[in-house]
Image: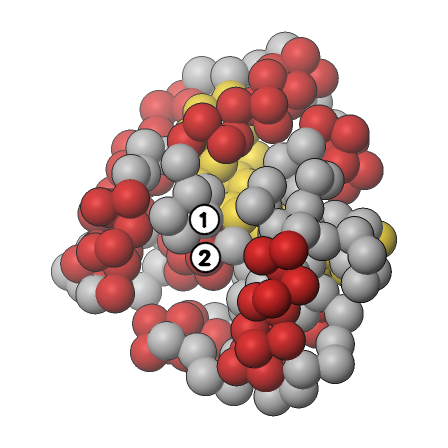
């Protein structure tokens, strides 16, 4: 498959700086433009509302369209970390959302989701809406979905991970004794109908363990080119 530009939508409250090592590795690997959707902590706090999602997805649409116009394939590769992965599932759809119709599959043929809480017992209304309207790899006939989950052993995660994981897994999947990345359990991060990748010893973010989805040696494990 020819190399093509990459667009990344990060996770809730995670700063853009955290993704720079991933971006650098991908630029070197693909020799293509790699961009982040700009999102600061204030932007993420607004995602409790549909118009907060729209703010970020509007930015993603503008960047995806511009990158696709420069792409040899006419497409870009999308990567969503955590909440970003759920939002990009919505971005692919050709139905109206909050006054916008994105139809992001016009510009992409591959979507990676990294530690994204695709299913949850106590999901936010917006996440529930995504999974209800666009269940699983809904557009798999046009987009190759790849979902990546981290599976920490008890000794792998940080003190924060060990403290937060049981309660987070309970809220997401209804059980405390599950494998996961310190925040999202494996069963929630693996999207039905997608290519499934589970990585031992990989944490949700840098605060949850030394090796997370954006660590270059880990990126190398899930990246499919």
Residue at the image point whose x is 29% and y is 44% from the top? 41
Screen quadrant of the N terminus:
top right
- Furthest toward the front, the residue is 159
Circle on res. 168: none
Which residue, given by chain and number where applicable, does mark 1 sit on? 11
Which residue, given by chain and number where applicable, does mark 2 sit on? 83
Question: From the viewer's perspective, is 46 left or right of 57?
Answer: left
Q: Nearer the viewer, residue 192 or 96?
A: 192
Circles 2 and 1, Cβ within 8 Å, touching? The answer is: yes
Give the x, y percent position of residue 209.
67, 46
Q: Secondary structure at mark 2?
A: helix
Vertical side of 28 occupied by 35: above or below:
below
Distance in Å between CA atoms under marks 2 and 1: 5 Å
Vertical side of 25 occupied by 111: above or below:
below
Q: Secondary structure at mark 1?
A: loop
Screen quadrant of the C terminus:
top right
Q: How is the model colour-coded?
A: secondary structure
């Amino acid at each position: 498959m020819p190399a093509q530009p990459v667009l990344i939508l990060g996770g809730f409250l995670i700063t853009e700086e955290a993704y720079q090592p991933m971006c650098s590795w991908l630029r070197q690997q693909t020799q293509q433009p790699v961009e982040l959707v700009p999102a600061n902590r204030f932007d993420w706090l607004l995602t409790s509302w549909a118009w907060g999602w729209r703010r970020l997805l509007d930015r993603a649409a503008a960047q995806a369209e511009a990158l696709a116009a420069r792409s040899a394939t006419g497409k870009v590769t999308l990567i969503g970390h955590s909440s970003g992965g759920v939002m990009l599932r919505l971005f692919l759809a050709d139905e109206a959302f909050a006054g916008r119709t994105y139809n992001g599959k016009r510009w992409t043929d591959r979507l990676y989701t990294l530690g994204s809480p695709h299913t949850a017992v106590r999901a936010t209304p917006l996440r529930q809406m995504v999974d209800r309207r666009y269940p699983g790899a809904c557009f798999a006939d046009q987009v190759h979905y790849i979902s990546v989950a981290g599976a920490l052993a008890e000794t792998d995660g940080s003190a924060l991970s060990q403290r937060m994981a049981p309660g987070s897994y309970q809220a997401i999947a209804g059980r405390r004794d599950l494998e996961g990345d310190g925040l999202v359990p494996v069963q929630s991060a693996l999207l039905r109908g997608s290519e499934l990748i589970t990585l031992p010893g990989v944490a949700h973010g840098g605060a949850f363990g030394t090796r997370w989805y954006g660590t270059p040696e880990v990126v190398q494990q899930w990246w499919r080119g």
